[in-house]
Image (spheres, rainbow, N blue to C red):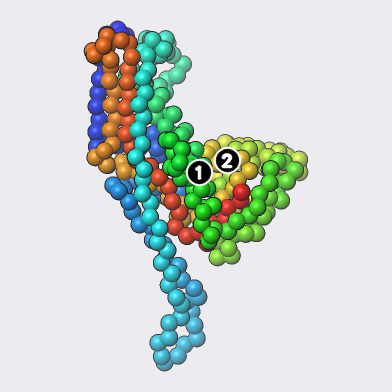
């Protein structure tokens, strides 16, 4: 491929949605269906979740309210982010030449140089968004408050004091999380315990020590503990766990937002260099609805 070829392209608003979607929604937790996605938030959106007490009472001739209704209301407000990246074509040319000549073993890579560069950036954004989803802090550049920070600040969340998890204690520590789950949630299909990679490895080793060495393989076999799904999340920090229903955890973005932008600028036409600048603008944030239905092990 001649390095003088111009690849300058701009996508904005809805046209940028497919690239933004690939960058944000391909994070590990979201791909597994671990949270509800709110994809079209332009500014902020209120999250409402209805809960009631016991509904059934003995029959009578009168109308007596049999329960109270609780309407939880929190809001999710995606934060604006940008990626400004300069790449040198020379650094990618060996791979690109192999692809263009059909000599690469990486058949899944895009067939255009522009998409090749974008795929590199999208993968980086997806990995960072996975970290932000769980462990982000709004005070840090390029981050929003993750679920752990939000849960830690909510007095209604059910807290379990954690420790350093390894193969010798992982079963006992998971048991503490199970015991803290409210009775009305235990056994629900949407309930999961979200765990880190290190906790998953410890759990597999603990099972092997008990004689079940072929029961689980991290990344290949779905895992559960006492009937509750264990979801391995790449962004979950070590020695932390969360038990919650999927429908109580949210990731918000504005895929159709007018401010979204994906731009690839070939600087050869501007300053004669072999650099390519990539600009991406998007929004992202996370939130939960009812703290009393979440267990945080930390």
Callout 2: SS: loop
Residue occupying the point 72% across, 41% down: 167
**Residue 212 percent across, percent down from the top left:** 72, 42
Closest to the observer, 262 or 55? 262
Disc 1 + disc 2, Cβ < 8 Å: yes
Q: Which mark is residue 254?
A: none
Comes first in the chain, label 1 or label 2:
1
Residue 85 in sight in this render:
yes
Closest to the observer, 155 or 69? 155
Q: CA distance from mark 1 to mark 2?
A: 8 Å
Residue occupying the point 31% across, 41% down: 255
Q: Which residue is identified by label 1?
A: 134
Question: In this rendering, is residue 295 above or below 132?
Answer: below
Question: In this rendering, is residue 12 above or below 230?
Answer: above
Question: In this rendering, is residue 15 above or below 93?
Answer: below
Q: Which residue is identified by label 2?
A: 237
Residue occupying the point 63% across, 55% down: 160
**Residue 181 percent across, percent down from the top left:** 59, 59
Q: Is residue 241 left or right of residue 43?
A: right
Residue occupying the point 33% across, 37% down: 282
Closest to the observer, 192 or 10? 10
Callout 1: SS: helix
**Residue 151 percent across, percent down from the top left:** 52, 53
Circle 1 Cα neighbour tier, 10 Å, few/some/many (<14 / 14–19 / ≥20): many
- Quarter assignment of residue 50: bottom left
Q: Quadrant of the N terminus?
A: top left
Question: In this rendering, is residue 100 above or below 108?
Answer: above
Circle 2 Cα neighbour tier, 10 Å, few/some/many (<14 / 14–19 / ≥20): some
Residue 27 in sight in this render:
no
**Residue 208 percent across, percent down from the top left:** 73, 39
* Total marks in image: 2
Q: Is residue 292 left or right of residue 177?
A: left
């Amino acid at each position: 491929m001649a390095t003088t070829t111009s690849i300058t392209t701009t996508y904005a608003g809805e046209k940028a949605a497919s690239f933004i979607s690939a960058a944000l929604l391909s994070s590990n937790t979201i791909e597994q269906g671990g949270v509800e996605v709110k994809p079209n938030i332009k500014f902020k959106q209120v999250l409402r979740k209805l809960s009631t007490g016991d509904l059934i009472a003995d029959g009578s001739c009168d109308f007596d309210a049999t329960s109270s209704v609780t309407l939880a209301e929190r809001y999710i407000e995606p934060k604006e982010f940008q990626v400004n990246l300069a790449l040198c074509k020379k650094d990618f040319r060996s791979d690109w030449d192999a692809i263009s000549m059909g000599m690469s073993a990486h058949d899944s890579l895009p067939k255009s140089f522009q998409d090749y560069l974008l795929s590199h950036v999208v993968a980086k954004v997806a990995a960072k968004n996975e970290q932000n989803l769980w462990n982000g802090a709004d005070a840090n550049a390029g981050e929003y408050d993750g679920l752990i920070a939000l849960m830690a600040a909510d007095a209604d969340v059910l807290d379990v004091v954690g420790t350093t998890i390894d193969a010798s204690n992982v079963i006992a520590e998971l048991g503490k999380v199970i015991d803290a789950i409210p009775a009305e949630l235990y056994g629900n299909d949407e309930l999961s315990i979200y765990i880190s990679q290190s906790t998953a490895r410890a759990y597999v080793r603990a099972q092997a020590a008990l004689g079940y060495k072929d029961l689980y393989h991290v990344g290949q076999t779905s895992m559960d503990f006492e009937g509750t799904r264990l979801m391995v999340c790449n962004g979950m920090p070590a020695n932390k766990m969360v038990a919650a229903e999927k429908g109580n955890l949210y990731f918000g973005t504005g895929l159709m937002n007018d401010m979204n932008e994906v731009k690839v600028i070939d600087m050869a036409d501007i300053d004669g260099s072999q650099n390519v600048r990539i600009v991406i603008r998007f929004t992202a944030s996370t939130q939960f609805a009812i703290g009393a239905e979440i267990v945080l092990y930390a």
